[in-house]
Amino acid sequence: MSYQARFKVWRGDADGGGLVDYEVAVHEGEVVLDIIHRLQATAAPDLAVRWNCKAGKCGSCSAEINGRPRLMCMTRMSVFDPAETVTVTPMRTFPVTRDLVTDVSYNYVKAREVPSFVPPARLKPGEYRMRQEDVGRIQEFRKCIECFLCQNTCHVVRDHEENKTNFAGPRFLMRVAELDMHPLDAADEAGVDRRQGAREDHGLGYCNITKCCTEVCPEHIKITDNALIPLKERVVDRSYDPLVWLGSKIRRRKE
C-alpha cells in the first residue's frame, strides 16, 4: 500500500533553522531513511543526512523522530498512522552541523579519555584464556554500534551542557565497566585504577540511573542494569566499605 505522508524535517545549520513541511510518497515496507532519501531525490536535493549501512549496524543515521531518539534505518513507517505528521530533527544534545547532521566529536574526546585494555604481563598473545561465563558477562557490551543515542538521551548532558567536561556519558561508562569486569585486564598492575577513574575522571556520580539510555539502545543492551549499576556498586564498595578498603590496602602492601 502506498500513500502520501506529511513530514516535518529540520533544516538549518549552526546559526539556526526550523522545521520545513514536505509531502512525500511512502511505499509498503519502507523505513524513515527511505523517505529522507526520497526527499533528497525529489524535493530537497541539498538535505544533509549522515548514513552508511542502512542495516542498523553502523550507527550513522541517528536522529529524533517525533521527539524520540532512533535510528532512521530501523524505524519503519508502518509504526506511524498514515494520517500522522512525522517530524524528523537532529540529535538535540550535540551541535548541529547542517540539517540532520550533528557534530558528535564530544564522544570521541571521551573515548580517548578511557584507558585501553592492559594485557597481562605474565601471558603472551595466544595464551589468553577466559571462562565462558566471563566472556558472556562482557560480550553484551561489545554489541554497541556507537550510534550515540544513549549519549543523546542522557539528561545529564542533554539538559546541562556544562556537564560535558566532567561526564563521559553512558556509552563510555559502559566501556569502563566492561574493562573493569574483564578477568584478564591488568590495569591495576599498570597503576590504572578504573573504579577511581570512573568516579573522579568520568563522572559516574552524575548518573542517577533513570534507564533512559537503555530505553533507546537499538542493540537492546541493558546499559543501566548490567553495566552502570554494578560499576556504581563496586565504586561505592571501594570508597566506603571499610572491609573492602582495608583489604585493598593489605593486598597492595603484600605486593
Image (cartoon, rainbow, N blue to C red):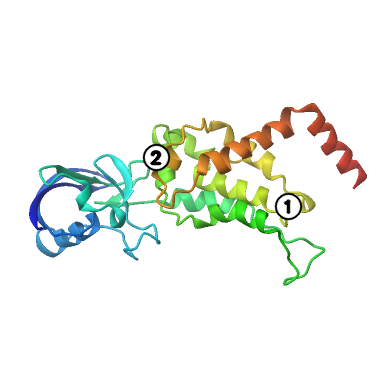
Question: In which quarter of the view is residue 193 placed?
Answer: top right
Does residue 104 lie above or below 196 as drawn?
A: below
Mark 1 belongs to which amino acid? Ala
Mark 1 = which residue?
187
The residue nearer to you, when weighing 138 against 203, is 138
Mark 2 belongs to which amino acid? Thr
Q: Secondary structure at mark 1?
A: loop
Question: In which quarter of the view is residue 84 placed?
Answer: top left
The 10 Å Cα crowd at callout 1, few under 14, some 14 to 19, many 20 or more, is some
Mark 2 = which residue?
153
Q: Secondary structure at mark 2?
A: helix
Query: Residue 191: x percent and y percent?
Result: 77, 49
Specify whether residue 93 is in view.
yes
The residue nearer to you, when weighing 230 against 29, is 29
N-terminal-most mark, 1 or 2: 2
Instruction: Tell me what residue is drawn at x 52 percent, y 39 percent.
Output: 224
From the viewer's perspective, tell me whether residue 67 is left or right of residue 132: left
From the viewer's perspective, tell me whether residue 15 is left or right of residue 248: left
From the viewer's perspective, tell me whether residue 52 is left or right of residue 129: left
Query: Residue 59: x percent and y percent?
Result: 39, 57
